[in-house]
Every structure is written in C-alpha cells, then in structure tokens.
Image (cartoon, rainbow, N blue to C red):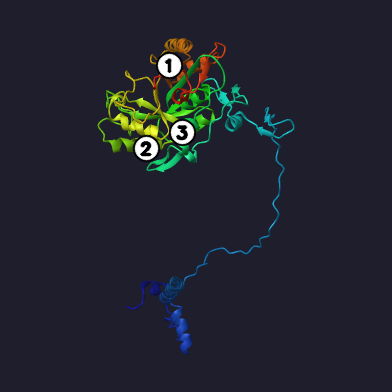
C-alpha cells in the first residue's frame, strides 16, 4: 500500500483518488515545489544562515544602538547669591606709628615677625587665654645665621669657621648682655631638638636670656634651633661623646669614642657641626670618659679653630680636663646642675643655691635638662628675678671673658 490509512478512511466511498495537477511551466513547478513544507523550512533556515554570515563578516557597528542628534547651545553661567558670613571682630593690632597700616593681626604673626613670645597654660589651645610677652624696643636681637663670613661647606654640609681678622661664631651669634647691675646668673638648658613638645615649651616659656643646647638628631633640629634664635635664645650644639658606662649608656649615632682614630672622630665631629647653623659653641652630651682622655685634645682643638667655645654642662663627675689645651679653646664648666634630683622642691633648692653663689661671686653658670618639670620651675623662678636684684645673662658670657675672673674655670 502506498496510501496512508487516514487517507483511505477519510476519502468518501466511491470517489476516485484525486491526482494533483502538475503546473505546465517551469516557474510554476518551482513555485509548487517551494510550497512543500520541507522545502520551505529548508529555504527559511538557509536565509537565516546567510544573514548571520553577512553580519559576522561585514559587521554593523551601529546595529541596535539608538542614535539622535541634538544642538548644544552655550549659555552664560547663572550666578546665585550666597549668604554673607558674619565678619568676626578684628583683634587689636600693632602699628609702626599712628596712622600707619597694621602689621600683624594674630598672636602667631606677632611672634613670628617681631619676636613676641606667646605663653599658654599647659594643655591649652590657641583659642584660650594667652599671655603675650612683648620684648622692649631695645631688646637684643641675634645676628642672622648662617653668616657667610664664618661659614664654609664641608663633607656633611655647612660648618662654622674662623673668619678673617679672627671673627668667631662665639662672638657673632652670641646674645648681647643687657646693661644693668647686680649679680648675674647664666643658665643653659640642654637636650633639646628631639622631643618637639618639650623643645617648643622651653623656647616659649623660658626667658630669652636663657641659652638652649640642641642635639644633632631629629629631622626638626635645624628648624627648632632657628625658632629658638628667632625668640632671642642663643644656642649651643650638643656633641654626643662616650661616657664611662658606654655602651650601656649610649649617646646615639655618630658618638665620639676614645677607641676611634683621630680622623674618624674628626669626621663625626664634622657631621654634628653641619646639622644646623647659628650656635656659639659646643656642649657635651654625656662624655664623662672622653672628656678626660687624650682623644679629646684634637677634638677640643678643632672646636676652637672654628671660632667656637666648649661648655661642660657639669653632669660628669669630673670636669673636662684634657692633657693640654694647646689651641686655647675657651672652655667652661657649669657649677650646678639644677635638676640633678628631678623633683620640684630639689630644683627650687638648687635655684636658691645658684642665687647664693651669684651674690657671693658676682656670677654663676648653671645647667638643666629640657624636661617639662625643669622648664616649669625655672620659668616660675625667673618671673621675680628682677625684684630679687639678680640678672639673667646668656651662657656665652662665661666663654667670652665678660664675667668676673674670680669665678673663672676656663683659665
């Protein structure tokens, strides 16, 4: 059988099978063939395949993307009114003369531009009450540093030197002694330049006549030393030197040692001297062993050859006594260490002892560390020093010969 069962069952009885008419033309035959389901489906699938191939081969970068063209017109920006902030009341200002323009408008500007020292209570901020200490017009001013007449470039940077006609840094950078009469007390505060809070407190709170000694360490040493000079303090360079219990007590990098050869100690000395400019002399940092050893002699000679003096802060049990001082470098030792016992009552007692020595001999040189307690006791004591008939003078007085020879320890 060639016919399906459905065709036999559905064809009416007695009706012969209809034979479809064949198209007479070739085009008709093609149309008839195309109408067959299988051939039509194959043709449609082939069309899709050809279209996909053309898209892949040729591409359509903008196919399916919406496109629109708009015209951009430039307009002037709209300025909106802003609320005016209330203008704060201007503080009192300092003028050079009646009718002239103001020079400063804040305590910070006054301190920077004219040497005013701003003293704030511990822990207070700039917005709280302050005491502004304005120096008198005749207050001594320090010479700018570095001075090219007494400076030269070294391996580690700019260093002091003895200038023409024997001009010394000891004289150029020293704070002049203010005129007056009565017993004199010179104080040098040491160990500054490392702790920034303690250094800033010493610069701000201590009278300008107090000398300050800075260590050669820390990234802020040069800036702190310059700030101290701007406030009127003359400064010293503290030189790390070997103590008896080294290395248990270690002054730090670049320490000068008795075991090193002369050129090695000379290089370490040059490194320390190039840390910052403007100092009048060198003070020891530790150094109890080196200062009584023969290795100290060439160091002391180099210090004097560069126009500087040497100050022994008195913390070592024995004074700096090298075998000889062939270079005649000015050298002096502090008679008292005010905070040898770091208690408020002990510091006050040492200050009273310094007063007694000054009255007996006319002059006394003392030292103290830059600890907050020491700075606080010295600052409190110095407030009434004029009323007690005493005068504060810079420590360079002891090195430059401007003191009573009866108390000299440098000769």
Compare marks 1 and 2 and give the one earlier in the sequence.
2
Q: Estimate the x, y position of residue 41 in percent, counting from the top left.
A: 43, 73
Say whether disc 1 or disc 3 marks the residue closer to the N-terminus.
3
Callout 2 crowding tier (Cα within 10 Å): few <14, some 14–19, many ≥20: some
State the count of labels: 3
Report the Cα–Cα distance between label 1 and label 3. 24 Å
Q: Which mark is residue 407?
A: 1
Q: Secondary structure at mark 3?
A: helix
Q: Residue at x 41, y 35 (%)?
A: 306
The reply to whether residue 328 is visible in this rendering is: yes
Front label number (1 vs 3): 1
Crowding near the residue tagged with mark 1, few <14, some 14–19, many ≥20 C-alpha atoms within 10 Å:
some
In the displayed structure, 72 sits above or below 283; it is below
Q: Which mark is residue 271?
A: 2
Q: Nearer the viewer, residue 145 or 253?
A: 145
User: Which residue lies under the disc numbered 3?
Assistant: 169
Q: Is residue 321 above or below residue 72?
A: above
Tell me where residue 249 appears, x and y as whole percent.
Answer: 30, 25
**On the rendered image, what quadrant is the N terminus found in?**
bottom left
Q: Is residue 255 visible?
A: no
| Camera-side mark, 3 or 2 | 3
**Foreground of the two, 218 or 2:** 218
Q: Where is residue 261, by image quadrant?
A: top left
Q: Secondary structure at mark 2?
A: helix
């Amino acid at each position: 059988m060639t016919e399906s069962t459905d065709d036999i069952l559905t064809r009416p009885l007695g009706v012969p099978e209809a034979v479809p008419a064949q198209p007479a033309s070739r085009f008709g035959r093609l149309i008839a063939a195309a109408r067959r389901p299988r051939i039509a489906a194959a043709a449609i699938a082939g069309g899709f395949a050809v279209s996909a191939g053309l898209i892949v081969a040729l591409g359509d970068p903008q196919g399916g993307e919406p496109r629109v063209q708009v015209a951009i017109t430039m307009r002037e920006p709209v300025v909106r009114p802003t609320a005016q902030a209330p203008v704060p009341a201007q503080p009192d200002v300092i003028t050079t003369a009646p009718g002239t323009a103001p020079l400063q408008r804040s305590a910070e500007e006054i301190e920077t531009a004219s040497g005013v020292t701003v003293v704030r209570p511990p822990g207070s901020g700039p917005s709280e009450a302050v005491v502004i200490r304005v120096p008198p017009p005749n207050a001594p001013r320090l010479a700018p540093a570095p001075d090219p007449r007494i400076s030269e470039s070294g391996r580690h940077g700019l260093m002091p030197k003895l200038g023409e006609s024997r001009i010394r840094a000891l004289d150029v950078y020293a704070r002049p002694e203010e005129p007056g009469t009565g017993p004199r007390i010179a104080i040098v505060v040491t160990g500054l330049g490392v702790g920034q809070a303690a250094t800033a407190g010493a610069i701000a709170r201590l009278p300008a006549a107090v000398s300050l000694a800075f260590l050669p360490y820390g990234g802020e040493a040069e800036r702190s030393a310059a700030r101290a000079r701007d406030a009127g303090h003359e400064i010293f360079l503290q030189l790390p030197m070997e103590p008896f219990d080294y290395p248990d007590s270690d002054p730090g990098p670049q320490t000068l040692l008795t075991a090193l050869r002369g050129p090695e100690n000379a290089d370490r000395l040059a490194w320390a001297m190039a840390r910052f400019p403007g100092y009048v002399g060198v003070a020891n940092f530790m150094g109890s062993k080196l200062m009584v050893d023969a290795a100290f002699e060439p160091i002391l000679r180099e210090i004097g050859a560069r126009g500087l003096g040497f100050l022994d802060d008195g913390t070592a049990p024995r004074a700096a006594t090298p075998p000889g001082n062939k270079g005649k470098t000015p050298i002096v030792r502090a008679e008292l260490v005010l905070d040898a016992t770091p208690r408020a009552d002990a510091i006050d007692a040492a200050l009273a002892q310094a007063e007694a020595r000054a009255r007996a001999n006319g002059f006394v040189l003392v030292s103290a560390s830059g600890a907050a307690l020491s700075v606080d006791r010295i600052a409190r004591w110095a407030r009434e020093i004029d009323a007690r008939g005493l005068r504060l003078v810079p420590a360079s007085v002891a090195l430059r010969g401007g003191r009573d020879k009866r108390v000299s320890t440098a000769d």
